[in-house]
């Protein structure tokens, strides 16, 4: 099985390191790329500038509270873009606010997860997310148009 491409959009280096550790110890071969703000995320997804040759992610893990362009704006842009909208976007954030949950689902988030404070729980959540999206769910092929 080829390696799964995951894009983590996260401005907290500690959380990015935890996610990387969780994905490295998981059962699924993956390649994790991390960007730290919303503008960089959109450049990555649109293959602009230094991201011209990056692989298309199979899954996006998106924090909501980001510098430059917040996660809600990034989500709206992804889901409005014909070439990106089928990439599953999992919201992985500290916010448990009902307004954030409603807004992101209204913007077509595929899933909303509140980050656990506990280190072991955080790792379990990331690993369970990876397991769900790559062993249970059937995703459309990259080139699918409709």
Image: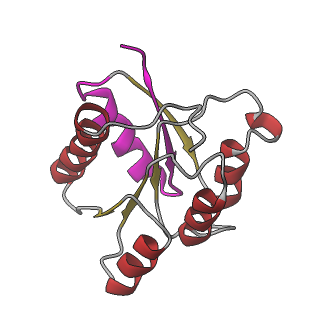
Residue visible at 40% across and 42% down in the picture = 17
- From this view, report whether residue 29 is shown above or below residue 43: above
Disc tally is: 0
* Residue 16 shown in magenta: yes
Q: Residue furthest bottom?
A: 99
Q: Residue furthest front?
A: 146
Residue at screen point 17% across, 52% down: 121
Residue 98 to residue 57: above or below? below
Q: Quadrant of the C terminus?
A: top right
Q: Is residue 99 left or right of residue 81?
A: left
Q: Position of residue 125 (x, y in %)?
A: 22, 50
Residue for point 48% across, 50% down: 13
In what quadrant of the picture does the N terminus appear?
top left
Residue 128 x %, y %: 21, 43
Choose between 14 and 128: the one closer to the eye.
128
Instruction: Report x, y in % for residue 126.
Output: 28, 45
74 left or right, relative to 62 = right
Q: Quadrant of residue 118?
A: bottom left
Q: Give the answer, above or below, for where 110 lies relative to 55.
A: below
Q: Residue at x 23, y 24 (%)?
A: 27
> On the image, which quarter does residue 67 sit in?
bottom right
Residue pushed farthest top? 1
Q: Is residue 126 magenta?
A: no
x and y, in percent, of residue 136 in the image: 22, 37
Q: Residue furthest right?
A: 49
Residue 112 lies left or right of residue 14; in this view the side is left
Left or right of 113, for residue 13: right
Q: Which residues are magenta?
A: 1-28
Question: What scheme was used to colour the molecule?
Answer: secondary structure
């Amino acid at each position: 099985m080829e390696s799964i491409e995951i894009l983590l959009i996260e401005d907290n280096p500690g959380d990015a390191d935890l996610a990387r550790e969780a994905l490295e110890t998981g059962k699924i071969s993956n390649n994790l790329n991390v960007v730290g703000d919303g503008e960089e995320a959109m450049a990555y997804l649109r293959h602009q500038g230094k991201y011209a040759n990056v692989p298309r992610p199979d899954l996006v893990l998106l924090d909501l509270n980001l510098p430059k362009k917040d996660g809600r704006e990034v989500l709206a842009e992804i889901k409005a873009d014909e070439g990106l909208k089928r990439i599953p976007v999992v919201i992985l954030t500290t916010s448990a606010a009902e307004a954030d949950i409603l807004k992101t689902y209204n913007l077509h988030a595929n899933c909303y997860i509140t980050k656990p404070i506990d280190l072991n729980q955080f790792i379990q959540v990331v690993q369970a997310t990876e397991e769900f999206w790559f062993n249970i769910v059937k995703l459309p092929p990259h080139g699918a148009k409709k």
